[in-house]
Amino acid sequence: MTNFSRTLLALGFGVFGFAHAATSEVTEPNSPLDSESLFSALASEPVYGETAIELLDQLKTKHYASIEIDDNFSSLLFDKYLDALDGSKLYFLAEDVQKIARYRYTLDNSLSAGNVEPGFEIYNLYHKRVIERLIYAINRIENAVPQMDFTVDEYLLLDREDEPFAASLEELNEVWRKRIKNSVLSLRLTGDDEEEIVEKLSKRYRNQLSQVLKTNGKDVFQAYLSNVAATVDPHTSYFSPRDSENFNMGLSLSLQGIGAQLTTEDEYTKVVELIKGGPAERANELQEGDRIIGIGQGVDGEIQDVVGMRLDDVVAQIRGEKDTVVRLSVIPVDAVSESSARTISITRDTVKLEDQSAKKEVLELSYADQDYKIGVISLPTFYFDFEAAARGDEDFKSSTRDVRKLLEELKEEEVDAVVVDLRNDGGGSLSEANQLVGLFIETGPTVQIRYSGLRNGFTRSFGDSDPEVVYDGPLAVLVNRTSASASEIFAGAIQDYQRGIVLGGQTFGKGTVQEIIPMSFGQVKLTRSKFYRISGESTQHRGVLPDITFPDFYDAYDDIGESSLDGALPWDTVRPVEFRTYHPVQAFLPKLRELHEARAAESPDFQYMIDQIERTRQLRERELLPLNEEIVKADRERVRRIEFDAENLRRKLKGLELKEWVEEDDLYSDEVASVVDSEHSEASTTEESANNPEIAMAEKSEASASTSPTPDADADEEAEEPEETDPLLLESGRILADFINLSNGDLSARY
């Protein structure tokens, strides 16, 4: 593989893991907890310091920008690390921060000497404070709920980022008292009684504590070096060996294992789903709902107990090389105890992760007295299996190969136009972006790459040299604010060539290129260059502006996009390269916009989305959350009524059946309680951990670490009513129909 083919434009960051260490007593309701006995300092290993030296060398010699590892870098790293650990000021006291501030201007010297102890000391203090806070929360939930007064007018501050660290333990306790009271109030409003609230919240916080106690030195090392890398720029990352495996798996959309998604439930590893066609499904012995309590390697390897083990450690033992055997001790889904456990053997194989693969559908619409068939290709990421391709595997995963196949199928179905849906596509392989453009043009440049460092100022263009055009018909590209990197290269090239129409929202604005560079211990994803459109414009910060703008829900958020990231490289330009245009898209745009805007003004869906974006923006601007039950109920009812009326107006204008209003007291009847509780539990947990890396990373690991992607829980459920077609896709189809009519079907013109 060339450097170019292994170049990445992904937005993804490292995956943190949590190791094996929790005790069953921690999760036992009402069992006493003591922070001194639970806390154990996490220690570094010699390889961590050696890796730090190697990482600094990679940053200084290979990064696009000129990097100086000095006191200024140390200060930036200190702030970034502190913010990553406790950005919401919920754990450290002011005196803690004063204590660790002695490292502000010395981290650079320590790292250069191969010493990561300061990073561990800071983390250990944080780790201890997290344990203390969770014990405080558990004790308050299990002992103080009956005394909570929900008639008092007091408020919870939602965003503590700009707040000072608590000056005393009493002040921090007051912050947490309000947070816990809000969690209790949230469950009260779902109809739970006091006993149910205590049971649910106790279990939630004890499970969080259990996961936090599984933190080990590898996690601290990953967290610290990730922040070292990110201090240079937001897209430079360090991956430990295990996290490297997870990152590469995500890029290639394949792994070697058994093909099962796993989760943790009451200290057991539970099977959530078997991947269709995977080794576990083919073996027909493992079932969804089974609990794995032991793992053995090979046909006669000793079965090792894995009850209470971190999920990522369990996954690491189950994954393995193709054609090797793993033995699982399993409690069947219909059994109640470990006495019913049985041992099964599964031969590992390559598992294709189809969840993120390109997919197609055909929309049929009647517009302007004509019927149209619009092909839609959805591409969630630009994937490429480098290792399989290097091995010479004929069926390696590639987004371009998959899209080519889907285009051929759409042509056989005689579609009138095609929409490439890149909404929420955060990027991936640069070579895939380049090749994907080539499916729609004859030959020509697709992107320019500007290198720095040893190749300072050198700009090179890459393009398509294959004259074959897989699809030459009317084309639109649909993007939004989270379409980034490789998505922006593709959309920008299609726009510059006037090969198609770009629709949707402004894209993310990531104009930097990363490469994966192997290290002795792990790997670094490092910004090596910047990419530019063939017109010479950078997408950095500015992104790709659509030819026709659609409502974008992300418009309600001001913290999404390259410009919101600290340390992002600046916008600039290079010289354009020569290229030709395919269709007179620009000439048609004024009329296309006019027709679209007329439809949008009359569209119930578009008006609903615009209003919903504004409502979301207003909710996000709230600074204080009331803890008075009557005030909260009234506010919830008001917001619910506004949303209900807006939805019913949309349905009325579309001729759909109206929804019936449900009174607050009836919302949580027995038939819907389980659904509401599930949704609330997830939301409340997110609220507790949104700004707590240790808790949040534990939850992510235990909730979603797997040997396969997360399934669609509703995929097999019968819908209560016919699903409405995505209004943005429908409008994309109508714009393409207008384009066909305006051009009189003659799209062969060249500029």
Image: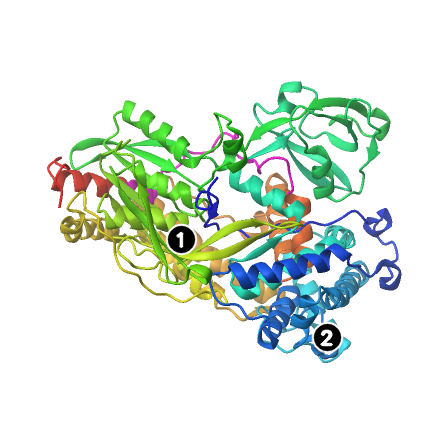
Q: Is residue 458 above or below residue 738?
A: below
Q: Main secondary structure of the magenta part?
A: loop
Left or right, 470 with reference to 310:
left
Left or right, 550 with reference to 20:
left
Please give the range of residues in magenta.
705-732
Viewer-closest of 445 and 325:
445
Task: Find residue 445 and report its horizontal and vertical position in percent.
Answer: 28, 46
Give the amino acid type for the residue marked by disc 2 in the picture: Ile
Task: Find residue 563 and report its horizontal and vertical position in percent.
Answer: 43, 65
Q: Is residue 291 above or below residue 267?
A: above
State how far apart marks 1 and 2 are (Cα): 53 Å
Q: Is residue 627 visible?
A: no
The first of marks 1 and 2 along the sequence is 2
> What residue do we see at 17% from left, 51% from top?
586
Q: Which residue is mark 1?
A: 645
Task: Find residue 614 and report its horizontal and vertical position in percent.
Answer: 39, 61
Q: Which residue is mark 2?
A: 100
Left or right, 158 with reference to 357:
right
